C-alpha cells in the first residue's frame, strides 16, 4: 500500500503518464541544490527488497553510458525503486534509465539553476486552475521525504502565509479572484547531518464559473444625453447577465437622492439561447439644473465582476440657450402682444377722431387760451355767388356758424358774412387770417373768380409757408377737376378734405362734424355761452339780419 501511495504522489508531482508503456520517456526538471529523486516500481517488483535487481543507467551524450553505483557518490542513493539525489546538481542533467529484468523506464532530466531572487524557480511551477467559489486545495506532496522533514513553511507570492491567512496547503478554501498567485511550500529536511530545502510551487489561477457568463452592458461606456429642462427623460440600461446578476443605478449624492429621479424595477427576460437579459430604467421627471452634468452610473454586478456605463445629461444645444418651452412661450407671448398692439394702433387710427374728441373733453384741453388769436377759424368759400341762389353761401354763412358757434362754442370769422368783398379788404383778410387758428375753405366745382382766388392764395401761401395756420377744406359738392385750386391747397387736398353729404351730415353727431371738430383746435365749451359772444367782431348789421 505504501509503495502505491508513493507511486501516485510521484506520478502526479512529476506529471508522469503512467498509462504509457515502459520505455516511454518522461521529461523532468529539477532545481540545482535541492534533493530530487526518480522512482519507478513495476508491479512485478518486490518493492521491499528489489536489491540487486534494479539497475540505474545514465546516458551522457550519444555514446557514453554508465551504470550508476551508489558507492561511488555520496550524493546519489538507491532507495528501493527510487534514485535519490542529495542534492541534484546541474551536472546531473541527462537521460536516466531504470532497468529491472525486462522492464525499463527512461527519464530525461534537466537540472536548472535556482532563481536567487525569488522563493521559487519559474520553470518548476505547477499550474493549477480553479473556478471561483470552488474548492481550492494544494498538496505539498513530498511524501517521499516525510521522514526527514523538520518543518514546512508556506508562501504566497513569496510572502510567508501567517496563521491568520487562508492557506490552501492546510485546509480547503473557496477560491476567490484575489486568491490567484504563486503558492510555495518549502520542506526543510534534515538528512545525514545536512539541511536541505525542497520547494514546491503552484501557479494558481482562478477562473470564472464556466456555466456563468461575464455580464455585458449594452451600449457605450460613456453616454452624453442631450435634454431639455422641464422635460422628462428615461434612461434605459440593459445587459446580458446570469440569472442571479443585478443591474442598479447609482443615483446617490451627498445630500440624498434627487426627488425627481426614480429607479424603476429591474426587468429580466430569458433570451432564446438560454441567456438572460436584464434592463432597468431610470426615470428623471421635470429635469432641472441639478440633474445636469451628474454621472448616473448603471452597473451590472455578478460573481465574475462588474461593469458600469455612465450617463450624463447635458443641456440641449449648449449651456446658455433658453430652454425650448420657455422660448416658445416667449415667442407666442411676444406675437400676441404684437398683434394686440397692431389692433390697438389700428383701432386708435380708426377711432382717432372720437378718441381725440373724447380726450379733449376728458382733460378739458383748450389750445385757444394762450396763442393770442381771436378766431378759431376763418371761413371762406371760393365762389362768388349771391345769397339767394347759392348753397355754398347758405352752408358757409348759416350752417357752419349755427353748428360750430352755437353748438360747439367756436368763434368763426366768415369771409362772406363778416368781410365785405372788394379790393379794400385784401389787407384786412390778411390780418383776419393771422388772427385765426384755422382756415376753413368750402370748395365747390363752380367757377371761382380769379380775384378772390388770387387774393386768398397769396394770403394762404404766406400762412402755409410760415406754418402758423392749419387749413381745413370742405368739399361741398364733389370736386372733379382740382386744377382750378391754388397750388398750395392741392398739397393739402389729400388729408384735410371733409366731404359734405347733405342730409347725412346734418346731425351734430355725424362724422362730418366730428371730423371737423377734430381738425378744429381743442376748445372747452364755456357754459352759458351767449349768442352775442360768439358773433364775429367784424359782423355787420346787414349780414346779421339775414
Ligand atoms: C564506480 O567505481 C567502480 C570501481 O570502484 C568503477 O569501476 C566505476 O567506473 C565507477 N563508476 C562511476 C560512475 O564513477
Ligand atoms: C524477459 O524476456 C525474456 C524473453 O523475451 C523471457 O524469456 C524472460 O522470462 C523475461 N523475464 C522476465 C522476468 O519477465
Ligand atoms: C501563472 O499563471 C498565469 C495565468 O494562468 C500565467 O499568465 C503565468 O504565465 C503563469 N506563470 C508561470 C510562471 O507559469
Ligand atoms: C531553506 O529555506 C529556509 C527558509 O524556508 C532558508 O532560511 C534556508 O536558508 C534554506 N536552506 C537552504 C540550504 O537553502
Ligand atoms: C430597455 O432596453 C431593452 C433592450 O434594448 C428593451 O428590451 C426594454 O424593453 C427597454 N425598456 C424600456 C422601458 O424601454
Ligand atoms: C460613476 O462612474 C464614474 C466612472 O466610472 C465614476 O468616476 C463616478 O464616481 C461614478 N459616480 C457614481 C455616483 O457612482
Image (cartoon, helix red, strand yellow):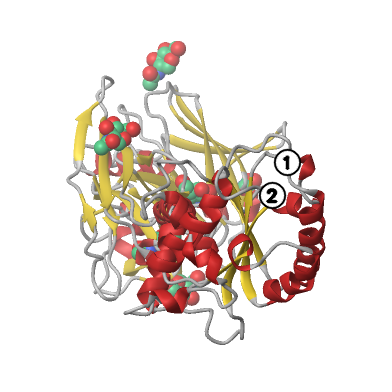
Residue nearer the viewer, 229 or 473:
473
Q: Are marks 2 and 1 in contact (CB under 8 Å)?
A: yes
Q: CA distance from mark 2 to mark 1?
A: 8 Å
Mark nearer the N terminus (2 vs 1):
2
Q: Which residue ends up furthest to the left in the rendered image?
A: 265
Disc 2 CB within 8 Å of nearest ligand 5 atom:
no
Disc 1 CB within 8 Å of nearest ligand 5 atom:
no
Above or below, 133 against 483 in this view is below
* Position of residue 344 in the picture relative to residue 320 (left or right): left
Residue nearer the viewer, 75 or 441:
441
Q: Is residue 110 visible?
A: yes
Residue nearer the viewer, 494 or 325:
494
Residue nearer the viewer, 73 or 417:
417
Q: Residue at x 71, y 36 (%)?
A: 61
Q: Position of residue 109 (x, y in %)?
A: 57, 42
Q: Position of residue 99 (x, y in %)?
A: 47, 31
Above or below, 459 against 249 in this view is below
Q: Which residue is mark 1?
A: 447
Quarter occupied by the N terminus: top left
* Position of residue 220 in the picture relative to residue 434 (left or right): left
Label 2's element? loop
Label 1's element? loop
The image quadrant of residue 427 is: bottom right
Q: Position of residue 62 (x, y in %)?
A: 72, 31
Q: Which residue is mark 2?
A: 384
* Position of residue 32 in the picture relative to residue 532 (left or right): right
Amino acid at each position: 500500500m505504501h509503495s502505491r501511495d508513493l507511486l501516485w504522489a510521484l506520478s502526479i508531482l512529476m506529471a508522469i503518464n503512467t498509462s504509457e508503456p515502459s520505455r516511454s520517456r518522461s521529461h523532468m526538471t529539477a532545481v540545482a541544490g535541492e534533493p530530487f529523486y526518480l522512482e519507478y516500481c513495476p508491479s512485478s517488483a518486490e518493492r521491499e527488497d528489489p536489491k540487486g535487481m534494479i539497475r540505474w543507467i545514465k546516458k551522457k551524450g550519444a555514446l557514453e553510458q554508465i551504470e550508476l553505483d551508489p558507492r561511488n557518490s555520496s550524493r546519489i542513493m538507491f532507495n528501493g525503486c527510487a534514485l535519490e539525489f542529495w542534492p541534484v546538481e546541474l551536472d546531473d542533467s541527462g537521460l536516466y534509465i531504470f532497468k529491472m529484468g525486462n522492464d525499463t523506464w527512461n527519464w530525461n532530466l534537466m537540472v536548472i539553476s535556482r532563481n536567487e531572487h525569488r522563493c521559487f524557480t519559474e520553470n518548476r511551477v505547477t499550474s493549477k486552475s480553479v473556478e471561483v467559489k470552488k474548492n481550492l486545495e494544494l498538496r505539498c506532496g513530498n511524501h517521499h521525504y516525510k521522514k526527514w522533514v523538520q518543518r514546512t513553511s508556506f508562501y504566497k507570492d513569496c510572502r510567508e502565509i501567517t496563521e491568520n491567512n487562508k492557506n490552501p496547503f492546510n485546509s480547503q478554501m473557496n477560491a476567490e479572484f484575489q486568491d490567484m498567485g504563486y503558492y510555495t511550500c518549502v520542506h526543510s529536511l534534515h538528512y545525514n547531518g545536512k539541511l536541505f530545502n525542497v520547494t514546491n510551487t503552484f501557479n494558481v489561477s482562478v477562473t470564472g464559473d464556466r456555466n456563468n457568463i461575464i455580464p455585458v452592458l449594452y451600449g457605450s461606456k460613456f453616454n452624453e444625453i442631450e435634454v431639455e429642462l422641464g422635460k422628462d427623460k428615461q434612461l434605459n440600461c440593459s445587459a446580458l447577465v446570469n440569472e442571479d446578476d443585478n443591474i442598479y443605478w447609482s443615483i446617490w449624492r451627498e445630500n440624498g437622492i434627487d426627488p425627481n429621479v426614480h429607479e424603476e424595477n429591474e426587468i429580466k427576460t430569458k433570451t432564446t439561447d438560454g441567456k438572460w437579459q436584464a434592463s432597468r430604467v431610470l426615470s428623471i421627471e421635470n429635469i432641472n439644473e441639478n440633474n445636469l452634468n451628474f454621472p448616473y452610473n448603471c452597473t451590472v454586478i455578478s460573481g465574475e465582476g462588474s461593469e458600469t456605463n455612465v450617463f450624463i445629461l447635458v443641456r440641449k444645444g449648449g449651456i446658455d440657450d433658453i430652454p425650448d418651452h420657455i422660448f416658445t412661450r416667449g415667442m407666442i407671448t411676444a406675437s400676441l402682444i404684437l398683434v394686440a398692439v397692431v389692433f390697438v394702433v389700428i383701432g386708435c387710427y380708426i377711432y382717432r377722431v372720437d378718441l381725440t374728441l373724447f380726450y379733449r373733453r376728458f382733460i378739458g384741453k383748450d389750445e385757444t387760451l394762450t396763442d393770442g388769436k381771436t378766431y378759431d377759424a376763418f371761413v371762406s368759400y371760393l365762389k362768388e355767388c349771391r345769397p339767394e341762389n347759392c348753397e355754398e353761401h347758405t352752408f358757409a354763412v348759416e350752417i357752419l356758424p349755427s353748428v360750430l358757434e352755437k353748438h360747439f362754442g367756436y368763434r368763426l370769422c366768415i369771409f362772406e358774412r363778416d368781410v365785405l368783398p372788394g379790393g379794400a379788404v385784401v389787407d384786412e383778410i390778411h390780418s383776419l387770417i393771422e388772427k385765426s387758428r384755422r382756415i376753413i375753405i368750402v370748395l365747390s366745382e363752380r367757377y371761382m373768380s380769379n380775384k378772390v382766388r388770387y387774393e386768398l392764395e397769396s394770403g394762404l401761401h404766406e400762412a402755409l409757408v410760415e406754418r402758423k395756420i392749419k387749413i381745413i377744406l370742405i368739399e361741398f359738392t364733389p370736386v372733379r377737376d382740382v386744377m382750378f385750386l391754388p397750388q398750395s391747397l392741392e398739397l393739402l387736398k389729400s388729408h384735410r378734405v371733409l366731404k359734405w353729404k347733405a342730409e347725412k351730415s346734418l346731425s351734430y353727431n355725424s362724422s362730418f362734424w366730428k371730423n371737423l371738430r377734430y381738425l378744429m383746435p381743442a376748445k372747452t365749451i364755456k357754459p352759458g355761452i351767449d349768442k352775442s359772444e360768439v358773433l364775429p367782431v367784424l359782423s355787420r348789421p346787414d349780414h346779421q339780419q339775414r
